[in-house]
Image: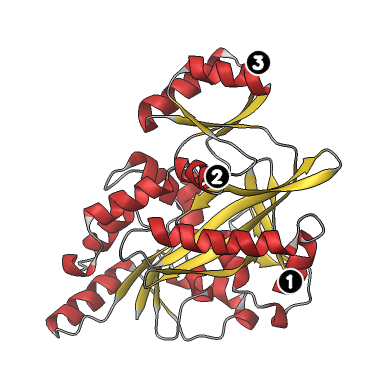
């Protein structure tokens, strides 16, 4: 039996690297209004921790046609009572299952009264944080001798040299999510405010990642899951972004998603990339890591042809792509979309 927690502040927590911090109002709102989401991938008998039980059941009811499992929403006080009861009966059968592991969510589990011996160690959390650094994507590109490159810098002078060489570059904070922490830079727009941002990132996170700006045609991802030290491929995620932030995912069969990708790249290249990533990810995850891993990619224009960028970033957590995979295409007409509606609330919709 698992206790699932949706913690969308995960990457911010990795950057802060603290037991406690106060997320922005927007992130707190997202956490509250999408807290029910693990009901989509939880198993029968699992529990999902939420702040507002009534709100969670109402949100889940809107997706009732796609939810077939007996999953229970619990609040913080009730969860503390359940944990105490299980400890007293010496029958603690719960497993922690957050969206992503970091110091903050580890502290949350401890605050619920979770037995320390049933939680990951601080060393495990440090290892997850280390591989979640964007340099891991750079290392994978080097591992596969890719046509694409990435650089890790610690000075403005290094950045200016890369701008001189490539003309336009993309700056990425080592730990950031959903398009945040990303800047597009040319020699002409390298303003003082941007230089201050760069200094702040380097001072706070130790370095800055820089990549040439490629002529992107389409975003997509490969979604994986680690179980018992083995990493297996779950499916493709073909998604859209608004500027650099996630907006929606295509819901259709895996066969149709492959057909879309094979318009641009060879089937053998897709299969080789899946296999290579399964092996690579299994070789770097810490012992005991269980859960989702998402690898963002893109199709890039190259003259009259196209190239596969095999690793834009690696997310050692569940992703919206994993969420979309839980809407089985058998239940839906192909080519529908899973959308996070930001207009008034953070509402998950299928259209």
Q: Up-down: is 7 above or below 175? A: below
Residue 312 on image: x %, y %: 59, 45
| Residue ID for mark 3 | 187
Q: Residue at x 26, y 48 (%)?
A: 19
Closest to the observer: 333 or 24? 333
Which corner quadrant of the image does residue 174 belong to? top left
State the quadrant of the C terminus. Answer: bottom right
- Residue at the outermost front position: 145
Q: Nearer the viewer, residue 70 or 58?
A: 70
N-terminal of the two: label 2 or label 1?
A: 2
Q: Is residue 59 visible?
A: yes
> Where does residue 230 sit, x and y in percent of width and height?
42, 70
- The mark lying in front, picked from 3 and 2, is 2
Element type at marker 3?
A: loop
Side of 80 where 303 appears, left or right? right
Disc 2: which residue? 141
Measuring 40% from the left and 85% from the top, which residue is drawn there? Answer: 45
Q: Is residue 336 visible?
A: no
- The residue shown at (56%, 86%) is 68
Q: Tell me whether the residue at label 2 lies in contact with that at label 1, contact meaning CB atoms closer than 8 angstroms.
A: no
Q: What's the CA distance linking mark 1 and mark 3?
A: 42 Å
What residue is shown with label 1?
Answer: 252
Mark 1 surroundings within 10 Å by alpha-carbon count, few (fewer than 14), some (14 through 19), many (20 or more): many
Q: Residues within 10 Å of mark 3 (few under 14, many from 20)?
A: few
> Sequence-wise, which precedes: disc 3 or disc 2?
2
Please state if 221 lies on the left or on the right of 31 as rendered.
right
Q: Secondary structure at mark 1?
A: loop
Q: Residues within 10 Å of mark 2 (few under 14, many from 20)?
A: some
């Amino acid at each position: 039996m698992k206790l699932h927690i949706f913690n969308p502040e995960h990457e911010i927590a990795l950057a802060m690297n603290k037991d406690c911090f106060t997320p922005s109002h927007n992130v707190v709102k997202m956490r509250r209004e999408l807290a029910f989401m693990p009901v989509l991938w939880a198993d029968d008998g699992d529990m999902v921790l939420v702040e507002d039980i009534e709100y969670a059941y109402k949100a889940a009811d809107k997706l009732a046609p796609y939810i077939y499992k007996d999953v229970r929403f619990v609040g913080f006080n009730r969860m503390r009572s359940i944990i105490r009861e299980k400890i007293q009966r010496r029958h603690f059968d719960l497993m922690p299952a957050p969206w992503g592991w970091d110091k903050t969510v580890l502290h949350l589990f401890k605050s619920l009264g979770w037995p320390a011996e049933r939680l990951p160690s601080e060393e495990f959390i440090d290892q997850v944080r280390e591989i979640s650094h964007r340099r891991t994507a750079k290392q994978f590109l080097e591992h596969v001798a890719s046509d694409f490159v990435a650089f890790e810098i610690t000075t403005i002078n290094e950045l200016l040299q890369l701008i001189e060489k490539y003309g336009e570059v993309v700056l990425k904070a080592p730990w950031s999510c959903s398009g945040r922490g990303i800047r597009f830079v040319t020699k002409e727009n390298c303003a003082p405010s941007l230089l201050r941002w760069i200094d702040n990132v380097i001072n706070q996170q130790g370095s800055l990642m820089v990549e040439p700006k490629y002529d992107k045609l389409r975003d997509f991802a490969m979604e994986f899951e680690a179980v018992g030290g083995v990493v297996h491929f779950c499916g493709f995620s073909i998604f859209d972004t608004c500027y650099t932030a996630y907006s929606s995912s295509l819901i259709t069969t895996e066969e149709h998603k492959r057909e879309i990708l094979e318009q641009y790249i060879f089937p053998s290249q897709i299969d080789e990339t899946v296999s290579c990533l399964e092996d690579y990810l299994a070789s770097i995850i810490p012992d005991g890591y269980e859960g989702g891993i998402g690898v963002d990619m893109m199709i890039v224009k190259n003259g009259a042809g196209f190239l596969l960028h095999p690793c834009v970033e690696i997310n050692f957590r569940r992703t919206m792509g994993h969420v979309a995979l839980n809407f089985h295409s058998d239940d839906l007409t192909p080519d529908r979309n899973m959308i996070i509606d930001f207009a008034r609330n953070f509402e998950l919709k299928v259209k």
